Amino acid sequence: MQTHEQFSTTAPGGIAGIIAPTVDGAIAAFERHVGVLRPAWAEAFRQCFPNTLATTTELCADGTTFVFTGDIPAMWLRDSSAQVRPYVRFAGSDPTVRRMIAGLIRRQAHYLVIDAYANAFNREPNGKGHQGDRTRMGPWLWERKFELDSLCYPIQLCQDYFTVTGDESVFDETLHQALWRIVGVMQTEQRHQTRSAYSFERSNCPPSDTLPEHGRGSPVSYTGMVWSGFRPSDDACTYGYHIPSNMFAVVVLEHLAHFAERFYRDGALAERAAGLRANIEMGIQTYGLVEHPRHGRIYAYETDGMGNHNLMDDANVPSLLSIPYLGYRPADDPTYLRTRAFVLSRDNPYFVAGRVAQGVGSPHTPAGYVWPIGIAMQGLTATDRAEQQALLEMLVETTAGTGYMHESFDPNEPSRYTRPWFAWANSMFGELAYRWARLDERDGKDD
């Protein structure tokens, strides 16, 4: 990697680092169509929708893009993909957006070739981050928590980008190597107990930040699914098969097989991806469903393949709530609807209802806090426009006067919150607001 040319490190409210005409146009359209009746919504959209471009995106001199999370100066494979997803729709007509996303795909591929077990990376090989963790660290790695969804998000970003642009240039040899690494790690972690060398331990930390059994995690048996040490929240899995992440893997492995055939003429990679996908799907349907006494047959959040299940959901995506957003099942699927009813009820230990807000939280933050990402995901998977509107209103009213989304907040007193600069949450709000306003359908019309 060459020397990097930094374009932006400003905090929320700072000068935009990257200006994209289509994003500015979307903001103007939202204000035109929504702002007259809902000025607070327009103000929040004006701040949140461009936040990733304005404050956390750096175009690098080597043609790649570095997208950090906000108040942590590292790039997560998951977060960076999710942060830019609302902009992908503009990549076909806006050269700035196209260059930014193509550059991110190239950087993600570079990172995956370095270490497909790591979840977060440094801008340069400067040795920053959690170098004291007992795992195979290196100077490029900020953190090496193995999270299955970190392998899925870059594939989905490639699919979304190519669908909009038809640009084949990102499918270079580095990405080819990265796709092989992804499949190889997934196959190894299908049999974590017997084939994997991965372990992770951290000292002087909460139990959720390290793995038991000398860093190997709690025992699991073979199910066909892929083991994951940590959840999308960066918290340790209770049981090693994180079902929402395996659902995401089922979706993206179909894309990966298509990439292998179309762009690389690599039948071996395509065959492995297809076989892996079939094994994971069988594992989900065999081991991931449980009978709940009130909700009926629903998906569990985690399992170990030995009869134990974790019945909960977490706001971080992939989640059970996000199943239609991931593309695993449609929003009207009966099993999803039963699972959704469970997730949005007090039967889910991380669903919280307060005086001014309610939604899905996470054990990653203080007990009783709600996550804007969870509220936004409820809206993105809702089929009722009135429900979406109520959730948008809830999000706008709980920014504690900042106009930005936070990691989490107290639903009784939103002025108590965590992480004032969390770009993923801002992007999720922007995505929901954009969809609710049907700006794609309007396509610049002033109706």
Image (cartoon, rainbow, N blue to C red):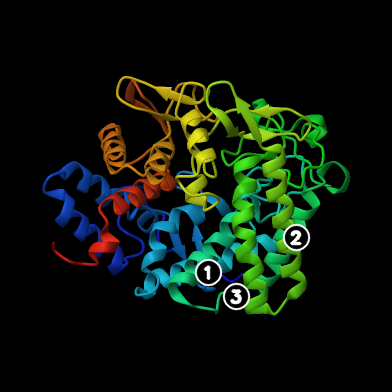
| Above or below for 307 versus 324 | above
Direction from residue 30 to residue 166 in the image, left or right: right
In the picture of the structure, the residue carrying the numbered disc 2 is 275
Say which of 265 and 49 sits in front: 265
Q: Which mark is residue 171?
A: 3
What residue did someone put label 1 on? 64
Q: Residues within 10 Å of mark 2 (few under 14, many from 20)?
A: some
Depth check, mark 2 against mark 1: the one in front is 2
SS at mark 1 in the image: loop
Q: What residue type is disc 2 on?
A: Gly
Instruction: Say whether disc 3 or disc 1 marks the residue closer to the N-terminus.
Output: 1
Q: Dot 2: what SS?
A: helix
Residue 313 in percent (x, y) is at: 54, 32
64 up-or-down from 31: above or below: below
Q: Left of 336 or right of it: where is 151? A: right
Whole-number angstrom distance, CA of label 3 to CA of label 1: 14 Å
Circles 3 and 1: CB atoms closer than 8 Å? no
As helix, strand or loop, the secondary structure at mark 3 comes to loop
Disc 3 versus disc 2: distance between alpha carbons?
Answer: 22 Å
The N terminus, quarter of image: bottom right
Q: Quadrant of residue 207?
A: top right
